[in-house]
Image (cartoon, rainbow, N blue to C red):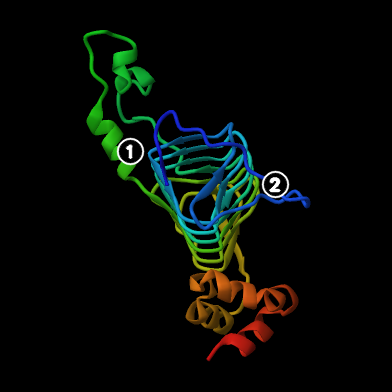
Amino acid sequence: MTAGPEFSAPAAGRDPSGAARLSPDGAVIHSSAQVQNSSFEGWTEVGEGSRIQNSHFEAYAYCDRYADIANATVGRFSNIAAMTRIGPTDHPFDHAAQHHFLYRSAAYWPDADDDAAFFAARAARRTVLGADCWIGHGGIVKPEVTVGIGAIVAAGAVVTKDVAPFMIVAGCPARPLRARFDDPTVERLLALAWWTWDHDRLRAALTDFRGLRVEAFLDKYQV
């Protein structure tokens, strides 16, 4: 599913529990969201007031209210909380001026063009969120940063460097606090790669996802 500059999807349907009725065919996008030049795989969701530009959501990824996501690849099962910014765009601060008029010039003078090269360079600076990572409320992940599989970005953190898989980072700038699991467990999770399972297999394992601690889950499902 790809949305153009004026795209706005219908408000999400809801079941009696209040959960969105998601679909394997694409995204559920809140009617107040703004989506431009972006694509969505199945079971994805975009929350109220969010703005998505030049990005791709892999299956099961979602963002909560007022997320601002640009130039990003959002991995499977990514969890993006409210008021976050992923891939926030930069101004040209090494020039004499850093104002919009440098690159959005057509808005200021009828005989000037926008700076296409600047916009192309900005769009090429991709942010990548790994599978099942969690970006906490108000977190910011800068351009050209990769957040690893299963990592956690604490609320209010500003991530300026890559984050290892299953690492918890916090602060401004964000620094590692601790890994979610020990190295052998991380290696086993990466080998199992449950985030690649199909929808039916996920459903079959749902009770164990809910009830088993990670070591027991791995013992049961790792060949």
Camera-nearest residue between 55 and 151: 55
Camera-nearest residue between 75 and 145: 75
Percent x, y of residue 30: 59, 38
Q: Residue at x 32, y 30 (%)?
A: 94
User: SS class of the residue under badge 1?
Assistant: helix
Above or below: residue 40 compared with residue 147: above
Question: Badge 1 local density, few (<14 within 10 Å), some, or many (20+)?
Answer: some
Percent x, y of residue 68: 52, 38
Q: Label for residue 122? A: 1
User: SS class of the residue under badge 2?
Assistant: loop
Question: Badge 2 local density, few (<14 within 10 Å), some, or many (20+)?
Answer: few
Q: CA distance from mark 1 to mark 2?
A: 37 Å
Tag 1–tag 2 contact (CB < 8 Å): no
Above or below: residue 109 compared with residue 121: above
Q: Amino acid at mark 2?
A: Arg
Percent x, y of residue 156: 63, 45
Above or below: residue 72 compared with residue 102: below
> What residue is pinned by disc 2?
14
Q: Residue at x 63, y 77 (%)?
A: 204
- Most extreme residue toward the top is 110
- Most extreme residue toward the right is 17
Q: Amino acid at mark 1?
A: Arg
Number of labels in the image equals 2
Q: Earlier in the sequence, mark 1 or mark 2?
A: 2
